[in-house]
Image (cartoon, rainbow, N blue to C red):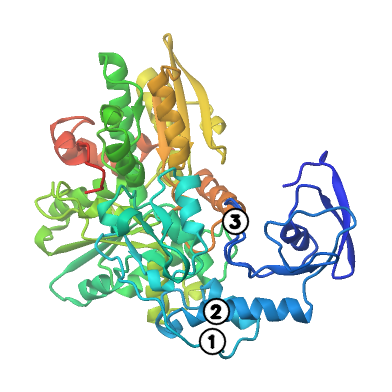
Amino acid sequence: MPNKNEPTVDMTIDGQSITVPKSYTILQAASSAGLDIPHLCYHPELAREGNCRVCLVEVKGAKSLLASCVYPVADGMEVQTNTSSVREARRTVVELLLANHPADCLFCVKNQRCELQQIAADLGIRQVRFKGERKHAPRDTNNPSLERDPEKCILCTRCVRACSERQGLDIFSVSNRGFDSLVEPAFGLGLDEVACSYCGQCTTVCPTAALVEKDDTQEVWDALSDPDKFVIVQTAPSVRIGLGEEFGMKSGGIVTGKMVAALRRMGFDRVFDTDFAADMTIMEEGHELLHRIRNGGVLPMMTSCSPGWVNFVQTKYPEILPHLSTAKSPMQMFGVTAKTYFAERAGVDPAKIVSVSIMPCTAKKWEASLPKFWDSGYRDVDIVATTRELARMIKQMGLDFMGLPEEDFDSPMGLSSGAGQIFGATGGVMEAAIRTAYEVYTGKSLVKIDFMDVRGLEGIKEAIVDMGDGLVLKVAVAHTLRNAQKIVERMRSGEADYHFIEIMACPGGCLGGGGMPYPTDREIRLARMKAIYDADARMKYRKAHENPAIIELYETWMGPPLGERAHRLLHTSFAAQDGRVK
């Protein structure tokens, strides 16, 4: 948003007189005037590079056409965005890109979601005039989370900038020169051979299908088609506030009931809620925090439910591993509980259970694949699909998603609290933990349940919580790994004296995850965040420890939080990695 006190300039675009902030580029000025200049390398949340040249415009007095995404406005500037020379230049640039691009649009996972495809259609390109040698490079598929197809890369470098600017990881760079240029990890290594966090933020900005999530939908269909399998599914809190976007809803729509109905019609034997397991996570993590404070444990304690963050710590900052909470993520807590507690109560052979997770996060695919998560005696979570993959499956079935009735989750692992729901937003884990930790510590009811100090999209948030009896909790919340680095550096320098830190790898938290619908920007994240807190406000139970299903679980089967069974099933450990994620 422009600063109201910022100096402005007067200019004309396509004969329209406008006044815009002096800091604007021509592209921004055109957008403010309701003109959509096509672009590929430009992304509003990333540094500007101007390397694709699709956004060329004509400026009076300029010797050549100018890249509007990087060229600044000036007082008296006269811009034309639709002259014959501009149209021809744009068509030529896009045709050159298409000449070196696979012609498999009908089979591509980004079909009708591809920005290159859309721009080609908008420019009226029906054939490519340029023929010649095409660049060939092998696909990178040797990891559980992401697929990279260099042949579909258009060298826009959005992934390079997102990985560097948002996450501070610098996994990608441009190698070679000219026709041989490639965007890839150093030395041509695969993503499984470098310190990639698998967060998938690269997939959220890639305009083509050069970077996408690993598609596991066929594995889900195969499980559902096997009469000998008992297939259950859990859905993360962010899925229900993003899924509707794939079916034409505005961002921020809550489709919980329709999502449950769709999953039932797909053939799942039980439809459960990850929010139930988020309540379990709070029970364990909240008690762990208090245990560390009372017994001189390692502080600050840091959340461990974001696998992208955990990957980052293991590869970049292994010395702070003791600060991570040993509580498993909600997804993994659900997985192990489903194949022990639920299997026992339902009388189902756990060997026949296939546990499917629908997640907003590509890194969850990696997390579920780890050999250490077999605490049930079986692989705790068998298959992870993203929100986008679930949408594709619903479309494959031909379901009229928006016409489906509202249905409820199954019991017992479908009942949750608002605290579990807000796990999907940055600051949500912290707020949920405070709701429980305060009442466990004081034995008093928390009067002000909405903890506004940790809400919002500010990169790093700090707050103080007066727990009574002289205990004042100092807490911090950060989202994106770039901001996580700032927190860690504060700890290293001794500046930070926090008790508890929440970190999410993705911007906005899980609601901005690498597996959420395209596109994702700040306004969309804000709309999704509002939906999450609205859903929380409408819940019957808003604190994890008040969830009747959680109370029943702990009183009749699990035993006390941090107890022997809870420790064995719901907690884990972390180890340093040697520069790559394993």
Asked if labels 2 and 1 touch by Cβ distance under 8 angstroms, the answer is yes
Image coordinates for residue 211, horizontal then vertical, percent: 40, 65
Secondary structure state at the residue bearing disc 2: helix
The circle on residue 339 is: none
Q: Residue at x 51, y 75 (%)?
A: 403
* Precedes in sequence: disc 3 or disc 1: 3
Asked if labels 2 and 3 touch by Cβ distance under 8 angstroms, the answer is no
Q: Quadrant of residue 174?
A: bottom left
**Cα distance between the residues tagged 3 and 2:** 19 Å
Camera-nearest label, 3 or 1: 1
Where does label 2 land, which residue?
Answer: 96
**Considering depth in this image, is 283 or 192 the residue closer to the camera?**
192
Left or right of 380: which side holds 250? right
**Considering depth in this image, is 229 or 410 the residue closer to the camera?**
229
**Cα distance between the residues tagged 3 and 1:** 26 Å
Where does label 3 land, which residue?
Answer: 49
Give the residue type at disc 3.
Glu
Where does label 1 land, which residue?
Answer: 130
Mark 3, other Cα within 10 Å: few <14 / some 14–19 / many ≥20: some
* Observer able to see residue 450: no
Q: Residue at x 57, y 37 (%)?
A: 458
